[in-house]
Image (cartoon, coloured by chain):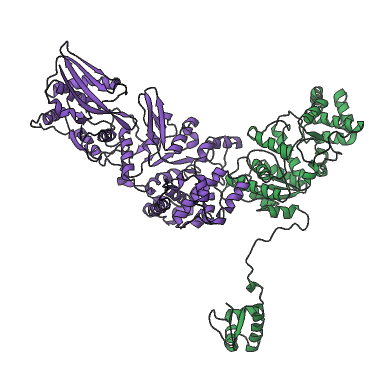
Chain colours: A purple, B green
Amino acid sequence: MSFARTCAVALVGVEGVVVEVQADLEPGVASFSLVGLADKSLSESRDRVRAAVINSGAEWPQKKLTVGLSPAAVPKCGSGFDLAVACSVLAAAERIDPRSIAELMMVGELGLDGRVRPVRGVLPAVLTAAGAGYRHVVVPEEAAAEASLVPDVSVLGVRSLRQLIALLADETVPEEPADERRGGDDGEDGVPGLLGAGWGVPQSAGLFQAPHAEARHAPDLTEVAGQRLARRALEVAAAGRHHLLLQGAPGAGKTMLAERLPGLLPPLTQREALEVTAVHSVGGALPAGRPLIDRAPYCAPHHSASMAALVGGGSGLPRPGAVSLAHHGVLFIDEAPEMSRQVLDALRQPLECGHVVVARAAGTVRMPARVLLVLAANPCPCGRHGSAGGECECLPSTVRRYRARLSGPLLDRVDLRVPVEPVARAELVSGTVGEATAVVAQRVLAARDRAVARYAGTPWTSNGEVPGHELRFRFAPVPSALARAEQDLERGLLTARGLDRVLRVAWTVADLAGHDRPTADDVDAALELRTGVRRGAGVLGSLP
Amino acid sequence: MTRDVGVEESPEVWETRRARAALARIVEPGDERAGRWLEELGPVAVWRAVREGGQPLAGASAHRWAGMRLRAERTDPDRDLAAIARLGGRFVCPGDGEWPRQLDDLGASRPIGLWVRGPCSLRLVALRSVALVGARACTDYGAHVAAELGGALAERGWTVVSGAAYGVDGAAHRGALAVGGATVAVLACGVDVDYPAGHGELLRRIAADGLLVAELPPGAHPARSRFVQRNRVIAALTRGTVVVEAARRSGSLITARHAERLGRHLMAVPGPVTSGLSAGAHRLIREHATLVSDASEIVELTGAMGEVAEEPARPVVPRDLLAREAAQVLDALPAVGARDAEELARGACSSPEAVTARLHELSSLGFVERVGDRWQLCR
């Protein structure tokens, strides 16, 4: 009778649960059972582990073998437990010393030939292990960079089970050839690094644009011709974290503008970067060369995306959706009125709380989803409504119904509504170039710093978080500044909540302009950005 | 301003009202032929003729007459009058105290009668009234302007009349209601029918604080032709019509045409020239309509003499009013420092005596001051 144990991590959403892997050998008819609520892919582990162990030159114990994964009540899935199971079996069979693996955390899938293959979610697994006190982890070699992001943990990256056995038994480590197929080739678009066909990852190419793609060609604001109003709106959106609706005819440049918003956002803090990397690791979208994502991600799901693709879910335990992959970044929904009403409404929770809760039979999972939302919409189904000279064939009732597809409660949370006109010929050819992303990003950073300084000592860090009555009393604008907004309130053009939102945007405009308090011009600019109707000097008049 | 309910009517008046109520269900709005019958024969006779059958009246084809007779079979004026009374409304006929005389400008096609619901007197609120009409699929700009104008007009004591449709109409009504002003909605269906469906709440508010007016009896549903006819009532009821935002082929342009034909003031609000949704309004401005940009300009046109729009605040620079020679002398003075008359004469190309005279003038106006025997600009 022999017993060995080691540790692995089960992923629930983007967080992990420490799982103890115990192997027990009893005399009896040779059998291998795996207990602990393993799902299908995990139960296939038995065959993989057996083949891997034999092909690594070790002997498979011919006894009654039971491997338990505890806590038994947590559902476990995936192939990441293979390495831990194999090592615990080998330790129970006394091929390696059980004490050497007792304090280790291991994660990795085993190929039938004994190779250790990378899996998703290595970073959250290592974070969990570190949090639980484990100081040494064993991961597949390709995931070693990702695992080393976690401080105070020593990471061992192995290429094969044979190597690991030799290391643990203090023998000479055999050489393993590197896998040529995966060597250093991440030149394809869309799904670089850990992803590839056949690794159990859905073909989500196009769903997500890897941040490291910007090393090749970062979109820059100088490429946008004209559109001064929309550029200002991007700046305000980035500086104050205000959600944005771009309305205009097809081809006006809404997608181009949205793509350039992440570049304006400040770089992520260490904590934010780890959070984002963890989500991407679970989603299987980490780039190979640079495991740490330190710039705001950009995610643009197609408008036909299902609820699970947008918000997270899928069969079994929920996987992060687009809204989580865009955590601390930009979520762009093009053709928003074409998206299913239900799916759009599902965005309300993340917009409000900054996380999304997905409940399934297998369990309830909470995933982070603090996004900056950009919606793009055409004015009507044919796209020509309101353009001079263009004949729109839609009936007024059709136009109305199309507009109503973006529900009131969702639009209410969108602070900025900007018309994007098709660029005039003169502007396209004139050659005058707008400001570069770097220049605007500087202003955005300065504005954010002003806000943080202003809210020092309060629980808030940005204009968007401050509640309404605080805005009106503690952080009030210049006394006469609200006159026009209050007139709108009286006329029924603005609700009281709308007025609070206008005030928040006005503070962001004031931060960008370097004013101590929002002036009347700042409030006018905010009104224009929120309602789409120009007042006074307008947005273009008030900002530098 | 409520009408006395329960005032006793003479039998003839009652019969006429019944007959008109019946014909309101049989005759489509804007039917000129029927209007002529009413003028020549009187409502009671026409109602009897349709009810009893026999020869079609002058000008009616056999089919048309048969159709009218079919409708007459289903018509029960007492039921309709009871229905409107249950709603707290009344049926207003030509000759009533509440009948707005300006509707008679429509001649033979004037409404047979109007079903009215609401606490105000139709004639009184229509005296100082302006129609605000525009596109149903309007932009934020159009809705904003409509609400602004509606509120501002209501604040000045003018009634806002519109069609309670989506878009500009709804915004205009809401603007007026928001400041507690009077608003009248002229409908293309019965006053108890919610059309458009999404405006049910708005219609109830107007019925409570303003007036709902319809040519069609309670329960009647809207049809395309009825919208066109409804627009003529809007144009006729008001002193002027303002088109806020209209595309090239908007229904509100029909209202504009009616207003023009009736000799009412026609006004339009411009929009961005890049927007196709203001193209209709721009064409109106080119043709006959007056450009207006706020309520005071509207009131200036439609109001009585003396209700002039405020002059927009413009900085009055005294220099504008100076005579040419005096202005030249003023220009000759340096910004800083004093000069004597001879130097200034050189600068102003004039004689020292003339210059001195001008300087004295300027001094009395407060532009220059004397320092010894030299002159300098006042600080």
Identify the residue at the far left of this view.
Answer: A172
Q: Position of residue B320 (x, y in %)?
A: 64, 72
Q: Quadrant of residue B296?
A: bottom right
* Marker count (numbered): 0
Q: Nearer the viewer, residue A123 or B12?
A: A123
Is residue B75 rendered to the left or right of residue B136?
right
Identify the residue at the far front of this view.
Answer: A457
Q: Say above or below: A345 vs B309.
A: above
- Residue B53 visible? The answer is no
Q: Nearer the viewer, residue B282 or A109?
A: A109
Q: Say above or below: A286 vs A461.
A: above
Residue that appears at 21% across and 30% down: A106
Q: Position of residue A120 (x, y in %)?
A: 28, 31
Q: Position of residue A142 (x, y in %)?
A: 22, 35
Q: Nearer the viewer, residue B94 or A380?
A: B94
Q: Say above or below: A166 vs A420.
A: above
Q: Nearer the viewer, residue B123 or A215?
A: B123
Residue that appears at 87% across and 39% down: B95
Q: From the image, which quarter does the N terminus of chain B lie in?
A: top right
- Residue B183 visible? The answer is yes
Q: From the image, which quarter does the C terminus of chain B lie in?
A: bottom right
Residue that appears at 33% across and 39% down: A275
Is residue B131 rendered to the left or right of residue B3?
left
Q: Position of residue A446 (x, y in %)?
A: 39, 54
Q: Quadrant of residue B351?
A: bottom right
Identify the residue at the far top of this view.
Answer: A29
